[in-house]
Image (cartoon, rainbow, N blue to C red):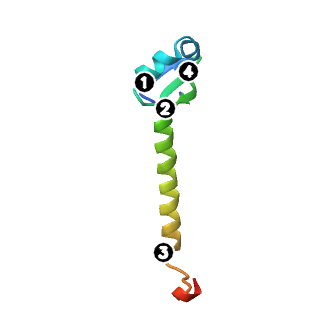
Amino acid sequence: MNAMLAGMTTSVTELKRNYAGILKQADDCPVAVLNHNRPEAYLLPAAYYENLVAYLEDLEDAKLIRERADGPFVEVSFDEL
């Protein structure tokens, strides 16, 4: 059984018939699009997707900071910059 990673589901057929209504009903949350009762895709509102990408970028930055926290460091003066 596939995990459902959304609070709302719809079928591919229903999505074709009522795209605007489903988006309105989703209320800025992800929607799992089912094909034969299995998740085929996820429909994400633009703002949700943008926040998700920003969050992933923050996680990548935090990982990079942890990796570089112990050096090596290069001493540089302001004149050299």
Residue corresponding to mark 3 = 69
Q: Is residue 17 above or below residue 9?
A: above
Residue at 55% x, 16% y: name it.
15
Q: Position of residue 24 (x, y in %)?
A: 43, 21
Query: Which mark is on residue 77?
Result: none
Q: Earlier in the sequence, mark 1 or mark 4?
A: 1
Task: Please say if the residues under marks 1 and 4 sit with CB atoms less than 8 Å apart.
Answer: no
- Disc 4: which residue: 34
Q: Earlier in the sequence, mark 4 or mark 3?
A: 4
Give whichever of discs 3 and 2 has the lower sequence position: 2
Q: Amino acid at mark 2?
A: Pro
Mark 2 or mark 4, which is nearer the start of the sequence? 4
Residue 3 placed where, x, y %? Answer: 50, 31
**Circle 2 residue:** 45
Distance from Cα at disc 1 to Cα at disc 4: 15 Å
Q: Nearer the viewer, mark 4 or mark 3?
A: 3
